[in-house]
Amino acid sequence: MPESLKFHFTPVDEAHADEKNVHEKASTDVADTIDILKKEFPDGISDVVVYAGEYTVFVTRDSLVEICTALKETLGFSYLVDLAGVDRFTEDAPRYEVYYCFVNIHAKKRIRLKVSLDEDDPVLPSITRLFKAADWNERECYDMLGIQFEGHPDLRRMYMPEDFEFHPQRKEFPLLGIPGSLPLPPRTPEGGLTMDPFAAARQGSPVKSYQEPESEF
């Protein structure tokens, strides 16, 4: 595993009380569903957060598959809308979160699950056997953040080459990338690989395309 890149932590503003959302929809009021989950999985739910009328249920890693199964097979949330990861990079909480958005089409309800993961153990069970739509979402989360999904049938990178050493959506990854980490094709017919596509932003001299006019930069 490559050495972690340096990152300077910037504290965030203190949270303030949430005002009632005038655009709040009935579809996000799933208090009754959450009550059922709490009763069935008393040790599987660590927290429930309500923001702008939307419920987020924090579940434990060990209970994730069971809760997803109950949502689909018992409670009617058979449509996985989205699945993605977040790098919170806070000092007093687990670094990563993976969220799952489900919809009960017939009841016109939606619910969000979240799982928190420590930096030194970013591993979750795959839910692809329950929701085929999770396949590419889990692959993208793995590619961009390095979250491992155990049991995934084909956990390969989606965007970056398999030998790429970094995960671009981690907070320590520079916005302009890392020079030399991903050589790009030549910009001229006889030129070499482009080792830094943003050389001008680093006070360097980018290679000009053979179709580009000469300039003073």
Image: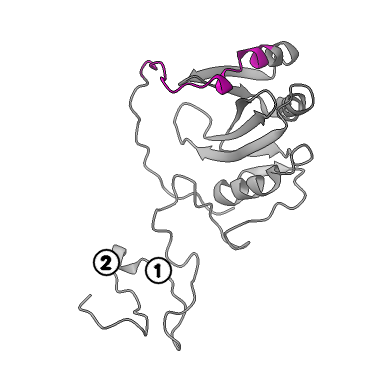
Near mark 2 (Cα within 10 A), the count class, few <14, some 14-19 or many ≥20, is few
Residue 143 picture location, percent across and down? 59, 52
Numbered tag placed on residue 203 in the rendering:
2
Image height of 66 relative to 152, above or below: above
Task: Indicate the secondary structure of the residue bearing disc 2.
Answer: loop
Specify whether residue 20 is painted magenta.
yes
Q: Is residue 21 left or right of residue 150?
A: left
Image height of 104 relative to 31, above or below: below
Q: How is the image coloured?
A: one colour
Residue found at the very far bottom of the displayed protein: 190
Residue 159 picture location, percent across and down? 58, 58
Q: For the residues labelled 1 and 2, say whether their Cβ atoms are less than 8 Å apart.
A: no
Q: Could you say which is closer to the camera, residue 6 or residue 112?
A: 112
Numbered tag placed on residue 197 in the rendering:
1
Q: Which residues are magenta?
A: 16-35
Task: Indicate the secondary structure of the residue bearing disc 1.
Answer: loop
